Amino acid sequence: MKKFGKKSPWILHYDASSCNGCDIEVLACLTPLFDIERFGAVSVGNPKHADLLLITGGVNAQTMPVVKQLYDQMPSPKAVVAVGACACTGGIFKECYNMIGGADAAIPVDVYVSGCAARPEAIIDGVVKALEKLN
């Protein structure tokens, strides 16, 4: 079984402003069917402990400072995975009056996982690609 690298990656998930479709798929990665933890990945709730930020949903005026603050609180080296069409580009909401854009409107993004909603297999692949930056 392939491990991620030198240490187990700690992952922080943040929903910037999604419809929750991608959030459900991120949570599916933790279930026994997909079981991302078998590779050593751990879900955490504190950005100061996280190696990787999984962000879902587009960035709007209210969530932009939160996204920036979460990213700034993460220790280096760190990586960001934008999950779903909204986090990648703003998705179907990109023309809304309050939408600024995808996650890269606020912070640097290392990996883009497309889809509406993104599939758990694609999310896990995105995590593996992002962790190459950390190792």
Image (cartoon, helix red, strand yellow):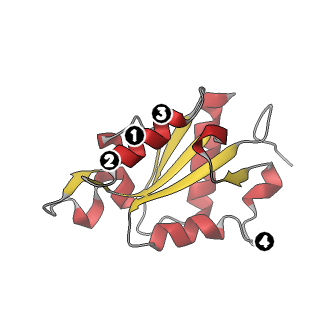
Q: Which residue is mark 1?
A: 68
Q: CA distance from mark 1 to mark 4?
A: 32 Å
Q: Could you classify mark 2 by the number of other residues whose Cα lies within 10 Å: few (under 14), some (14-19), or many (20 or more)?
A: some
Q: Which residue is drawn at the image coordinates 38% and 66% (left, top)?
A: 18
Q: Could you classify mark 1 by the number of other residues whose Cα lies within 10 Å: few (under 14), some (14-19), or many (20 or more)?
A: some
Q: CA distance from mark 3 to mark 2?
A: 12 Å
In the depicted view, which residue is nearer to us: 132 or 63? 63
Q: Which residue is mark 4?
A: 32
Image: 66 above or below 21: above
Q: Nearer the viewer, mark 4 or mark 3?
A: 3
- The mark that comes first in sequence, 3 or 2, is 2
**Quarter assignment of residue 49:** top right
The reply, left or right, for residue 119 in relation to residue 17 is: right
Q: Which residue is mark 3?
A: 72
Residue 70: x and y in percent read 48, 42
In the depicted view, which residue is nearer to us: 12 or 108? 12
**Amino acid type for the residue under numbered disc 2:** Met
Q: Are marks 2 and 1 in contact (CB under 8 Å)?
A: yes
**Amino acid type for the residue under numbered disc 1:** Lys
- Which element type, helix, strand or loop, lies under badge 4? loop
Quarter of the image where the C terminus is located: top right
Q: Which residue is drawn at the image coordinates 21% and 59% (left, top)?
A: 94
Q: Could you classify mark 4 by the number of other residues whose Cα lies within 10 Å: few (under 14), some (14-19), or many (20 or more)?
A: few
Q: Are marks 4 and 3 in contact (CB under 8 Å)?
A: no
Q: Are marks 1 and 4 in contact (CB under 8 Å)?
A: no
